[in-house]
Image (cartoon, rainbow, N blue to C red):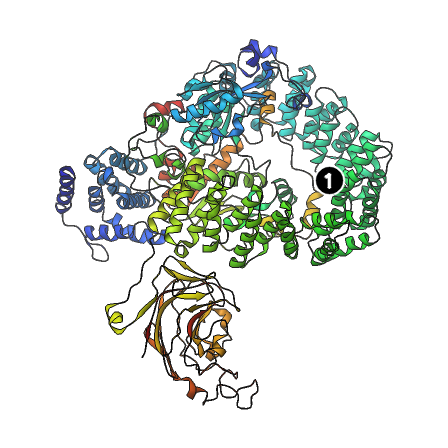
Amino acid sequence: MKKILFLFLSALMFMTSLPAVAQDARQRKPETIVQDVLALMPIQKADDLNREVAPLVEAAPQTVGILVGMLKPTAMKANNKVEYALNAITNYATANTKYKEPVLQAMKAALDKAPDDATRQFLESQIRLLGPVTEVEFVTHKGTAPYVQQFDALKAFQGTDFSKPLLKALKSKDRPYRIQALEYVAPLANEALYATVAKKFKKLSPDAQTDVLYWIGDNHVNSQADLVLAEVAKAGATAPAAMEAAVKLGGEKACDALLNALGTNYADDALKALYTYKGKLNDKLPAAFAGASTEKQQQLLQLASSRGVHEVADKALELAGSSDAALSAAAIKALPGIVTSKNAAQVAALLDKVPADKVGALQTALNAAVATLDAEGKYQAIAQQMKSAKNAARFFKPLAQTATKGSVEDLKKFIEGNGSQAADALAALKSTTNFAAAPTLLNAGKAGDADALNAYVSLVKDNERGIDSRCRKLGEALQVAKTAAVKKNAISALASAPTQLAFNTVSKYLDDKDVSYEAAQAVKQIAGKCVDDLDYKFMNTSLTKAMAIYKAHGTADDGYAVDEIKNMLTAAEPSPIYQLTPEEKKEGYEILFDGTNLDKWEGNTTDYTVQNGTIYVSANYGGGGNLYTKKEYKDFIYRFEFCFVRPGVNNGVGIRTPEGVDAAYDGMCEVQILDHDDPIYAGLREYQVHGSVYGVIPAKRIKHKPHGEWSTEEIRVKGDHITVIVNGETIVDGDIRKACQGHNVAPDGGNENPYTVDHRNHPGMFNKKGHIGFLGHGAGVKFRNVRVRELK
Amino acid sequence: MERRSFLKRSAAGAALFTILPRQVLGKMGGANNFVAPSDQLTRGIIGVGGIGRSDLHFASDQRCRLTAICDVDQKHLDSAFEAAKKSFNETVKTYHDFRELIHDENVDIVHIATPPHWHGIMAVEAANAGKDIFCEKPMTRTIGEGRRVQEAVKRNARIFRLDTWFRFKDTFYGLGTDVKPLKKLVESGLLGWPLKVRISGATGFTWKFFWVGKENLEVQQVPKELDYDLWLGPAPYKPYNVHRTHQTFRGYWDYDGGGLADMGQHYIDPVQYFLGKDDEFPIKVEVDAPQQHPDAVGIWRSITYTYADGCQIILEGEGFESSSKVPYIEGPKGKVYKGFECTIPNVQQLINEMPDPELRNTDYLDCVRTRRPFALNETNGHHSATIVNMGVCALRLGRTLHFNPKTQTFINDDAANLLVNQPMRGEWGKYI
């Protein structure tokens, strides 16, 4: 403690002992400039940084001295802002070199004042960057091995003719030695050298010849094409290298030589080379089939498929029916790369009649044949072929691949028909990417088909955009999932729907050892995105479990995950508990929601949940989606706070309403809660804006606070009089009976009521008492601190 | 010792070895082909706490056998040895000092799986010891170290593999495909030229912005199982805090450089490949980022690299993507989006009809035997590592930098060039 105090004092003394200096453009003293900049560290934008740091650098060395004097011993954990500032000074001065010297001198002078080794080392690293560029010594290891000697000799070689050292190396029996020389010489070689090597080529060992051939190919030595082709033709030990070189040099001659090599011992090498041949094969391949052995024909088919040579389509279809089993198999396997939409009928005919083991390949071929058509065209082409086929089930998979609505409907018919083809149809449906297949797959999944359930999860993940319905659908799949694979997929997919429901759902799987790691990942990911929506205690328990799972897993990412969770737990705050103010207490207010429970509420407590001190709404529009006070109220003052967390939120407060009805009509009224600033409400009527007595008294339009910020609202109801006050501003103050001239329903008994602004009947308008309710029309709003005072 | 002499520098040994044709070698790993132990290669792993501890490297393989492991954390070493025993009995040797593993004559291939600040020193040391090298990404932490690795590998005629693989296999993040069709499409010219490649969350690449460092670290007691001095090695001495070391070292400039340095090469290397820039460096790097702390890595908004011909690689930080629907590759004539959606009609069909990219060697053990270069080696690996490291320099200095590809230095920026070659603590500078 003493020591620290001493250092602090000495820093102060250092500062105060500075000579008076020029002030900057803003008339600030160096101390002020330093303080101003430190307050901003770290700065987000380069321009801002330069603007702020410039005066700091201009006032060097004083400013640098002050900053260095502020460095504390590392153990105090207080240096980061000073480090940012000094580093910014260094960066600035090294880009604007006239400042280098004063900054450098100031840092050097301050070195001895560094409070410990670590800060001194930091200063030294800054000083180094400010200093001149020094040649860093290349340590030359005096190796004695022949490779090092050769390399050094080549490097020291003064002449331009490398033929002598290269040929010497090529005569060696040591391959690394030869290759090293070839590689070294490559960028320096010229035509004369190539010619010399070619001249001596025959005298080299086959191994050395191989090395030279690769070298010719790798360096594209076009002048030696004849030598290469001669080696290809020889079909000896050098053939693989010669073939690779030949195709790298390219040209029709090379292509012909390689095609000739098909059907020989080196066919594999020739084929590999031909895949990469940079020229057209379209004319050459059909002709090459003439007189070719079955082996060569198979290789030609493979080549045609890899290179998309459609000109051999007829030949391939013909060979697919060959009696030679190997040839037929090769042809069928090659079809996908070769056929086009012109061949669809022929491929379909084959698919209908081939033995079962060839079906998969022909299904692929059928899809490949129609690949260039649009989705509907694909569907029509395949459906048409299926109609006339004996084995319609063989067309299910190609059909499903089109991912069209029609294909899904066709397959569903087969599944619902429950005939002999139902199983095939279901199998095919699992491969579609059309979301319309989802309900059928879910049903199959519920009946125990794990693959179907997996397919369902994938479809929901890729297609369901609504965050709450995605969450519900995945949760439903997870509930019936039996295999770890499906559970993992569903849990990981839930991580992309960051809601309280998703968090609660995946938390249950933290103890399931088959999927606990995925659950931990999901829990962390969700909490990271919606920490404010979560119940503190529950979140704490789940995240603590997740952290332990990460720790046990132990990879690089896990280390960061543990850190991240620790930070989340530190940052999160337990739910607040709301209490009445002394005035409210005196006036007889009652707390309806204090942040901890919904004990005074009933109705839809599934979609209205307590989250971290708030009532969070995830209810969908309509039906029993509302939350009501258990008690009924007559005249009252209702106070609450609301916060929109998503754009376009729609909710409302039901007044004197029975449960389970539309409060806007069958209750006294609904006081609108609406994010009316959202562009989707551009065409809103005035009686629909936030605060309006819906359909009866329009409210003064306010501008809402940004999403995530809280607003206060008060609704006073006394007899027929309603007052709505938002953030202290009265936006409705009127009498509903007067507003409709006493006609809450049309005097003629019809549906059209000329006396209300929405021209509708409001039969419940003159209710004497009823519940107060939150009327959910979708997710994304939170309420808190709800209290009421009955007016007697 | 004779069994591995073909890999070594002894002239007598070399005479005994005849190269087998590749089609024979290619089949050696097949299930039915027994490989005599004398033909089996051997590997030693340095750093067995993270990626080096992966089951992948502890599986028994007919063609290559794990013979040694090394770590400066005794707990990591003990736990790795337990795992290794299951596949290799107790024959696996354990080392504390990587130099002993490198000089173990029973090790053919040195697998470097340490934090990046060690990669350069260890690769150079292994090359000088006549070992082949399997190095985890990122290749090196500085541009200067990369040059030295390249030189040492060539000088000693070693086979070097950088371990990221997206330039030749595996689904390519948001693209739903491997790199081959992209390479074919780019080479065909259908997209036009120059191209702009955007690596961003919107196109399927996440930068792991949680891999950042902490400021004001508390000073902690070094755990007794850890040799912190040897863990730091060439890095500046800073008081121990657990966050600097295992797993979370990625957040500190001294050892790595956050998501950019640690993941960058995974994402950028295949781009360099399909742009055909394996022998080229960008000439400019621009950054848009918050001010960086001198020790703890922070986040950034974007980093833009420009090549001499106008091609650009743009990295967009997490949360700073230019829009949810930006193209991955953008050319004057066509665009490719996430999931390989393309503005060119029937692009899949067109790609099918194009030739495959030029042949490369993608089997590392085969390369070790035939001495042919691996598809991702000390040269193209140094190029993509340099892209990453140029970004790191620009980020740390907070300014646009211009690069001279010939000298591999920055133009008119001494401070940037001081980051190209960084000092090493104690004696470690002598190793590289």
Q: Position of residue B364 (x, y in %)?
A: 58, 26
Tell which of B61 and A416 is nearer to you. A416
Query: Where residue A582 appears, x then y in whole percent?
Result: 23, 68
Q: Looking at the picture, does residue B38 appear above or below residue A558?
A: above
Q: Nearer the viewer, residue B171 or B148?
A: B171
CA neighbours of label 1 inside 10 A, class few (<14), some (14 to 19), many (20+): many
Q: Which chain does the residue under circle 1 lie in?
A: A
Q: In percent of the image, x 55 and y 55: which residue is there?
A: B325
Q: Is residue B65 above or below residue A432?
A: above
User: Which residue is located at x 82 percent, y 41 percent?
Assistant: A354
Which quadrant is the C terminus of chain A positioned in? bottom left
Left or right placement of residue A635 versus residue B367 in this view? left
Q: Is residue B278 above or below residue A392?
A: above
Q: Which residue is mark 1?
A: A307
Which residue is depicted at the point 79% across and 29% down? A260
Horizontal and vertical percent for residue A215?
A: 63, 25
